[in-house]
């Protein structure tokens, strides 16, 4: 067992983990963050995406032991319990989700993209949006609703809405 | 789908990493981005007894070192997009990076990991073979340079010895009058390629004076195409006979036949990609002049 200290969604905790424990499992089991979804466990579906020191990272391809001293954000840190963030609201209004299994991964993958677009003051075209989310798989929506949600969230951001 | 047990070690310096790797030999492995190693461990296709975490070592510089561009082993794939030297000197390299996985993979995966993992259709191994890069490997006993063409032995098999680690990859900077391109086709965007072709050309007086070509998907490692390279020398940049080059190459290969594509399909695909990559490289040179 290895002792590690993680700052997860603003709360710091020291715990003992086995080296083989995946960050995804530790976040779910030790921190109770069930929004971290595990789809494929080999990096192909994107469901388990979290932010590790502000960078999107697949938590199924990361050992918790590697993250000692790091800052981690999960979907639970975005928009509060009622998912009020503009991107989450846009997913809802544009039918960007159905079963919801992949949604936390999409949100965490897309957050920095949306922030970057808003910072650059430009609306990305659909190809760019599709490239930004190409590492995430959704089996319900056919992606059109998600693309529309991203467009809407960036638009809102450009109007000062995020 | 969870890994077997192992011991975890965080390297605090390059010397520390080499000592640990030397001590563990076959039973130890470096972990960089984990984007290939951890899937293998989750499937239990890899069961190393010891992982040496090299992520906190300062091995991620991209720098000009005399006649070469030296890329540190921990350079993440995303770093190439806004690197002026890659854009200026290595157009095929920049093309190729766009085909690597997805944004999250590109933020975390490293060149040292990609080269050492040696997937037969991975882009960075192909690019290192195309540009005659040297793989710089270190162990407790010292440093050696391995030519990329001698480094990739088969699918997932390289010339690295147990206890050895890649510290950098060095790309000789091509002369000013050069051009290149890289094209691939996979089942879905971001997947590993079914086949890919990279081209690098030096030119003068509107003609090709030296050519290099690499192909993935024809064999279990990125292979050069000496016949096509000879054929292209002397060809004009305007209409460089790319289609003919594609046919010459396709006739010389014996690609695998599997669930993704038949050998015939692959041969046809490789011929067409060869044609398009040559045209794209020449068009780029003409647009510049
Ligand atoms: C969904 C998905 C899609 C992908 N698509 C592509 C793609 O299209 N093209 C592509 O090229 N790759 C793709 N990859 C793989 C990705 O590019 C990896 O980043 C890369 O292959 C390995 O780099 P890494 O830093 O993650 O290495 P790791 O996974 O950490 O290590 C890989 C192997 O290299 C060894 N190693 C690592 N660093 C060193 C070193 N410095 N010296 C010696 N040995 C070392 C490890 O021990 C291990 O055996 C994909 C991955 C995923 C999950």
Image (tube, rainbow, N blue to C red):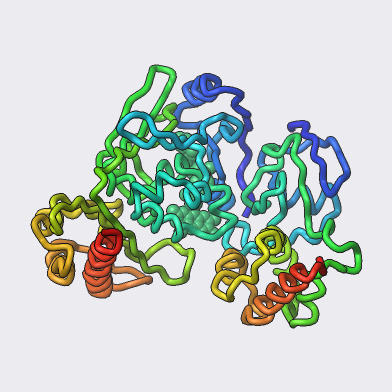
Q: Nearer the viewer, residue B26 or B148?
A: B148
What is the x, y in percent for residue B153? 29, 44
The residue drawn where x is 72% and y is 51% is: A51
Q: Is residue A48 visible?
A: no
Residue A49 locus on image (x, y percent): 68, 57
Query: From where the camera sits, is residue A97 visible?
Result: yes
Of B248 and B158, the residue lying toward us: B248
Q: Quadrant of residue B95?
A: bottom left
The N terminus of chain B appears in which quarter of the rendering?
bottom right
Q: Is residue A53 left or right of residue B273?
A: right
- Counting the numbered discs, the total is 0
Residue B215 falls in image quadrant: bottom left
Name the residue rendered at 59%, 35% in the picture: B55
Q: Is residue A54 left or right of residue B82?
A: right
Residue ID at (33%, 68%): B258
Spot the residue most to the front.
Answer: B289
Image position of A1 with respect to B219: above or below: above
Measured as percent of width and height from the top left, residue B7 is found at 62, 32
The foreground one among A54 and B268 is A54
Residue B43: image location, x then y, percent: 55, 53
């Amino acid at each position: 067992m290895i002792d590690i200290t993680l700052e997860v969604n603003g709360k710091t905790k020291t715990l003992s983990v086995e080296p083989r424990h995946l960050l995804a499992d530790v976040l779910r089991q030790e921190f109770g963050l069930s929004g971290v979804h595990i789809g494929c466990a080999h990096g192909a579906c994107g469901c388990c995406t979290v932010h590790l020191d502000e960078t999107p990272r697949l938590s199924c391809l990361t050992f918790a032991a590697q993250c000692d001293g790091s800052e981690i954000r999960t979907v639970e840190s975005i928009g509060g319990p009622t998912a009020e963030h503009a991107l989450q609201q846009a997913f809802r209004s544009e039918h960007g989700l159905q079963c919801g299994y992949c949604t936390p991964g999409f949100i965490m993958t897309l957050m920095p993209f949306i922030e970057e677009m808003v910072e650059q003051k430009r609306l990305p075209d659909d190809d760019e949006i599709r490239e930004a989310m190409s590492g995430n798989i959704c089996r319900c929506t056919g992606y059109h609703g998600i693309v529309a949600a991203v467009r809407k969230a960036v638009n809102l951001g450009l109007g000062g809405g995020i | 789908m969870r890994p077997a047990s192992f011991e975890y070690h965080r390297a605090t310096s390059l010397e520390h990493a080499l000592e640990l790797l030397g001590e563990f030999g076959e039973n130890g492995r470096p972990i960089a981005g984990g984007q290939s190693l951890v899937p293998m461990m989750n499937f239990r296709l890899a069961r190393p007894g010891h992982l040496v975490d090299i992520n906190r070592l300062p091995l991620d510089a991209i720098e000009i070192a005399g006649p070469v561009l030296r890329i540190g082993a921990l350079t993440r794939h995303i770093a190439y997009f806004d690197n002026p030297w890659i854009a200026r000197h290595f157009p095929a390299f920049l093309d190729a990076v766009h085909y690597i996985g997805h944004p999250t993979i590109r933020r975390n995966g490293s060149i040292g990991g990609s080269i050492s993992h040696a997937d037969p259709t991975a882009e960075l191994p192909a690019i290192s073979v195309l540009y005659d890069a040297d793989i710089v490997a270190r162990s407790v006993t010292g440093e050696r340079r391995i030519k990329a063409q001698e480094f990739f032995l088969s699918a997932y098999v390289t010339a690295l010895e147990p206890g050895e680690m890649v510290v950098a990859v060095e790309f000789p900077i091509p002369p000013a009058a050069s051009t290149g391109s890289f094209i691939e086709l996979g089942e879905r965007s971001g997947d590993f390629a079914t086949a890919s072709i990279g081209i690098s050309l030096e030119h003068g007086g509107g003609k090709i004076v030296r050519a290099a070509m690499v192909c993935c998907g024809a064999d279990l490692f990125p292979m050069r195409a000496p016949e096509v390279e000879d054929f292209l020398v002397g060809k004009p940049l305007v209409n460089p006979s790319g289609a003919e080059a594609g046919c010459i190459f396709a006739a010389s290969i014996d690609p695998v036949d599997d669930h993704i594509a038949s050998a015939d399909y692959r041969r046809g695909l490789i011929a067409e990609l060869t044609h398009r990559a040559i045209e794209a490289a020449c068009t780029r040179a003409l647009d510049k002049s």
